[in-house]
Image: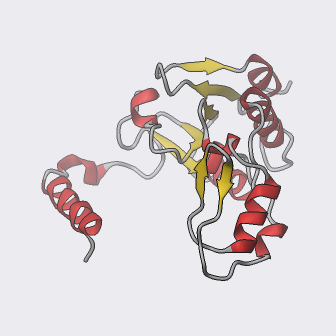
Amino acid sequence: MSEIQKEVLAANQKYAANFGEKSKLPMPPGRHFAILTCMDARLDPAKFAGLSEGDAHVIRNAGGRATDDIIRSLVISYKLLGTYEWFVVHHTDCGMEVFTNEIMTDLLAKSLETAVLDENGWKDVGVKPGSLEGKYINWLPIADQAQSVFEDVQRIRTHPLVPSHIPIYGYIYDVKSGRLIEVPKATEIGAVLK
């Protein structure tokens, strides 16, 4: 067993020992909203959005991008579990800003080992064979945070399975200050359609 695995299991035992009334939380989120955000470990949606267990759905992926699977999750969140407001939250200093589809495809073609970023850019240090499968994936890198938030809100808003009465808000989380900064054009396109 790895040290990390031991730490996680020890923390879980401590958490479960005081679980108490949390076992009675209902499945639908109590505050009836969902947040789509990045998987970056510096983001803690419970803290930046004031959440407790059972309050909201938090859906995460690399970059907080509105992929088909994210839209699937949001539609389930609404249709079966009653959320009626959604937030798209990207963030400053995102790892999705430091590569392109071409860079990622090239790195994967060389090896499947972890790459290194230095002053000269990305470098593959692996010795194992790579894969060309990565050339078929749009990795959804981010060149402009505000534009990517707008594009993701727009993609969600215009999806045929997304009801027009759900407001979708667009924000950028500032990793240096902890503040949410609205992207007005995203929130505008995400407004309730009349």
Total labels drawn: 0
Question: On the image, which quarter does residue 138 sit in?
Answer: bottom right
Residue 173 versus residue 75: which sits nearer the camera?
173
Give the colour scheme of this rendering.
Answer: secondary structure
Q: Residue furthest front?
A: 120
Residue 123 versus residue 66: which sits nearer the camera?
123
Q: Position of residue 57 (x, y in %)?
A: 51, 45
Is 177 situated left or right of 188 in this image?
left
Residue 146 versus residue 115: which sits nearer the camera?
115
Is 142 situated left or right of 136 in this image?
left
Question: On the image, which quarter does residue 2 sit in?
Answer: bottom left
Q: Quadrant of the N terminus?
A: bottom left
Question: On the image, which quarter does residue 139 sit in?
Answer: bottom right
Q: Residue at left 56%, top 48%?
A: 59
Q: Residue furthest bottom?
A: 129
Q: Residue at left 60%, top 61%?
A: 115
Q: Is 86 rendered above or below residue 54?
A: above
Q: Is 109 rendered above or below residue 22?
A: below
Q: Quadrant of the C terminus?
A: top right
Q: Residue at left 73%, top 47%?
A: 66
Q: Position of residue 88 (x, y in %)?
A: 65, 35
Is 145 situated left or right of 179 in this image?
right
